[in-house]
Image (cartoon, rainbow, N blue to C red):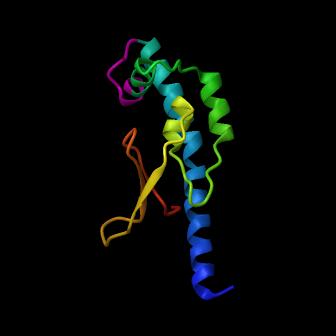
Amino acid sequence: MTAAVAVETALEELRLAALLRQAPLEFARVVYGLNDRANGRAGTMAAEEVARTVRQGVPVTRDRAEQRARAYLPVAGHEHCPRCWVFNGIKSPLHYREPTESRPESAACKVCGAEYASALD
């Protein structure tokens, strides 16, 4: 294995590890959104995400979101958005942005607007 291939493999593993950490956080967003809506707090960001998903015709339940969060498995080169997957069950492709001095490399979803840093903190 050449040094360039090793670096590329390490970067892919870092990207996947960072994304895998996001699925449980998106599940928590679903739970907070459902609870906020049930308690009359429809203006929170999480509640608005749930409402947007419901308006799209996709019912949002805690059980289904938990199943999706546990089943989230991105593939190198075909990474998909954890939020779209957990909320909707849709594999929206992520688009990577190069790092700059002020921000690390990140992956953005053009469907829901979520952005995920590739760096593990």
How many marks are shown on the rendered structure? Answer: 0
Q: Is residue 112 left or right of residue 63?
A: left
The magenta stretch spans residue 16: no
Q: Is residue 111 left or right of residue 10?
A: left
State the residue at coordinates (40%, 40%): 111
Q: Position of residue 12 (x, y in %)?
A: 58, 66
Q: Which residues are magenta?
A: 40-48
State the residue at coordinates (40%, 18%): 55
Query: Compared to 32, does 7 lie above or below?
Result: below
Q: Position of residue 95 (x, y in %)?
A: 43, 55
Outermost residue, bottom side:
2
Q: Position of residue 23 (x, y in %)?
A: 58, 42
Q: Quadrant of the N terminus?
A: bottom right
Q: Nearer the viewer, residue 79 or 27?
A: 79
State the residue at coordinates (63%, 55%): 75
State the residue at coordinates (61%, 58%): 17
Query: Compared to 86, does 103 lie above or below?
Result: below
Q: Nearer the viewer, residue 61 or 25?
A: 61
Query: Compared to 26, does 96 lie above or below?
Result: below
Q: Nearer the viewer, residue 52 or 40?
A: 52
Q: Is residue 21 left or right of residue 44?
A: right
Q: Position of residue 87 (x, y in %)?
A: 52, 30
Q: Nearer the viewer, residue 41 or 70?
A: 70
The magenta stretch spans residue 43: yes
